[in-house]
Amino acid sequence: RKEVEQDPGPFNVPEGATVAFNCTYSNSASQSFFWYRQDCRKEPKLLMSVYSSGNEDGRFTAQLNRASQYISLLIRDSKLSDSATYLCAVNRGGNNRKLIWGLGTSLAVNP
Amino acid sequence: DGGITQSPKYLFRKEGQNVTLSCEQNLNHDAMYWYRQDPGQGLRLIYYSQIVNDFQKGDIAEGYSVSREKKESFPLTVTSAQKNPTAFYLCASSHRGQGGSQPQHFGDGTRLSIL
């Protein structure tokens, strides 16, 4: 089993749709979780950290499910500009500061 | 504006040549990282540094070297021993934090190709 797994997609959704991605991780001791977006041929940009109680930033909601070892990202009212690859990153467990990266989920929002 | 600056944006390496990729940050971050990204593969850690004058190998350090003489700077040298250097190289930095990982912030990358 890979340490961090994501469905590569692509997810094709119309503008205004709600879409959700999951990211599963294998190390139950992982403590830090992040979602990034990466546009084609650009660097990853931090979208949001994921907190135990879940957190929201505008149209974006992140959740952590420790029992099933996954994090999720929900995007409401999708915009064309949301089209990108979404990467999850998880630390290697405990106080380890190194991150393990998923391969990303590709999202295309269509007019 | 605070940020991470990588240079050059594009770099070509000849056979047997060493090349150095620059990474400078003015975010006052203690930790810095070098990753490589290949098509169809996730970000893979080459080297990282938690503090000046100290650095550790990541998962794919062979054929690379780094130095951390200043807090702001973490240059990466791709040596001739790296037989497949063509990739997108990303530098990142973060606060050290008390435990676990802090969010990492990236420069805009260097694309390295072989001539």
Image: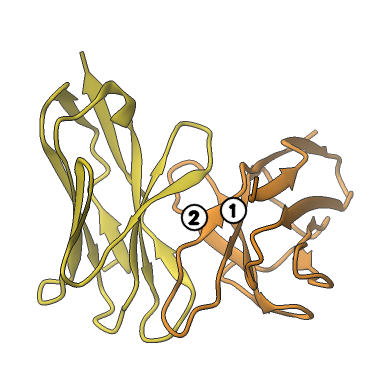
Chain colours: A yellow, B orange
A19 is higher (above) or lower (below) than A110 = below
Residue hosting label 2: B43
Q: Residue at x 79, y 71 (%)?
A: B68
Most distant residue in the top direction: A111
Of the residues shown, which amino acid type is indicated by label 1? Arg
Residue hosting label 1: B36
Q: Residue at x 19, y 29 (%)?
A: A78
User: Alpha-carbon distance for marks 2 and 1?
Assistant: 6 Å
Per the image, label 2 sits on a secondary structure element best described as: loop
- For the C terminus of chain A, the quadrant is top left
| Residue A39 place in picture, x, y as percent | 44, 34
Q: Earlier in the sequence, mark 2 or mark 1?
A: 1
Packing grade of label 1 (10 A; few <14, some 14-19, many >=20) is many
| Residue A8 place in picture, x, y as percent | 27, 43
Q: Residue at x 72, y 36 (%)?
A: B9
| Residue B76 place in picture, x, y as percent | 76, 59
The quadrant in which residue A48 appears is: bottom left
Q: Residue at x 70, y 56 (%)?
A: B25
* Front residue (pair A26, B49): B49
- Whether marks 2 and 1 lie on the same chain: yes
Per the image, label 1 sits on a secondary structure element best described as: strand
